[in-house]
């Protein structure tokens, strides 16, 4: 059964015109610039490009892997938003692939932080996705109370993710930076989903461009932190 269908209210209520998705949050997100925290951070490879031969192949592989996994995260999230908004028949397989990405992300941390940590990260990321489903369902149904509750739970979960990552690597992953990045990720994704549901397609596409830029910065911060924390694993 679709994640979305399992959370839908009575079908008749979904015939309401698309609700405004967290307009206060959306307006706030619109005014956000791509800051040093929220935008694309200098990657490990870019920072060390001037020092010939200073970047090992293993460091570059991790850098690329982290970017690919987070790129999948936002890509399949977008596809799920589009399919849900348009009642498209590919929604179920898209959801399956999106949830697989959360497992893949957790698995990427296991070589450094162990199976338990990787599995816990996956569980937190699954809540991140499932709560986003609740937001979309409430928004499309025009249920303001459920929408507000789902948004609060979503941002609380983002802080849990940030705090857990910080606990794994406190020296190189600042909790404040992680929380700011996660909040910015949610702000931009909320704006993207709202514009898609409201039929603002040109803006929706522009929103995704910002989501894409921002998540690459997150990916680089995470890979850089792992490389710095485990230098022996990334020697030439």
Image: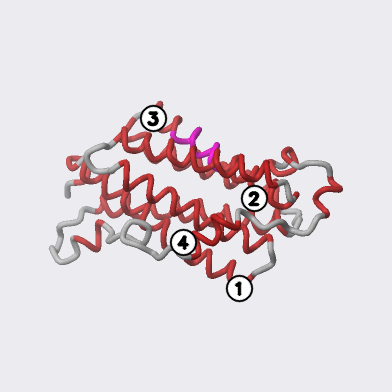
Q: Earlier in the sequence, mark 2 or mark 3?
A: 2
Label 4 with label 1: CB-CB less than 8 Å: no
Number of numbered discs visible in the structure rendering? 4
Q: Position of residue 67 (x, y in %)?
A: 39, 55
Does 140 appear in magenta? no
**Which is in the foreground here, disc 2 or disc 1?**
1
Q: Earlier in the sequence, mark 2 or mark 1?
A: 2
Quickly name the residue at label 3: 117
User: Please, what secondary structure does the residue beneath circle 2 have?
Assistant: helix
Vertical placement of residue 11 versus 118, above or below: below
Label 4 with label 3: CB-CB less than 8 Å: no
**Which is in the foreground here, disc 3 or disc 1?**
1
Dot 4, crowdedness within 10 Å: few (<14), some or many (≥20)?
many
Vertical placement of residue 195 versus 126, above or below: below
Q: Position of residue 19 (x, y in %)?
A: 71, 56
Q: Earlier in the sequence, mark 4 or mark 1?
A: 1
């Amino acid at each position: 059964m679709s994640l979305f269908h399992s959370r839908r209210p009575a079908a008749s209520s979904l015939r309401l015109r698309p609700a405004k998705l967290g307009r206060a949050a959306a307006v706030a997100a619109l005014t956000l610039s791509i800051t040093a925290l929220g935008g694309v951070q200098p990657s490990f490879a870019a920072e060390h490009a001037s020092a010939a031969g200073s970047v090992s192949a293993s460091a570059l592989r991790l850098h690329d892997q982290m970017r690919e996994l987070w790129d999948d995260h936002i890509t399949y999230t977008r596809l799920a938003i589009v399919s849900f908004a348009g009642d498209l028949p590919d929604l179920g397989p898209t959801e399956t692939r999106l949830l697989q990405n959360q497992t893949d992300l957790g698995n990427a941390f296991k070589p450094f932080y162990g199976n338990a940590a990787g599995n816990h990260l996956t569980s937190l990321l699954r809540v991140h996705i499932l709560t986003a489903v609740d937001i979309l369902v409430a928004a499309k149904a025009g249920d303001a109370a459920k929408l507000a509750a789902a948004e609060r739970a979503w941002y609380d979960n983002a802080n849990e993710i940030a705090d857990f990552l910080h606990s794994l690597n406190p020296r190189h992953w600042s909790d404040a930076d992680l929380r700011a990045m996660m909040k910015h990720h949610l702000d931009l994704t909320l704006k993207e989903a709202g514009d898609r549901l409201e039929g603002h397609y040109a803006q929706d596409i522009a929103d995704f461009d910002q989501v894409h830029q921002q998540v690459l910065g997150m990916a680089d911060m995470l890979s850089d932190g792992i490389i710095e924390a485990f230098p022996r694993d990334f020697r030439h």
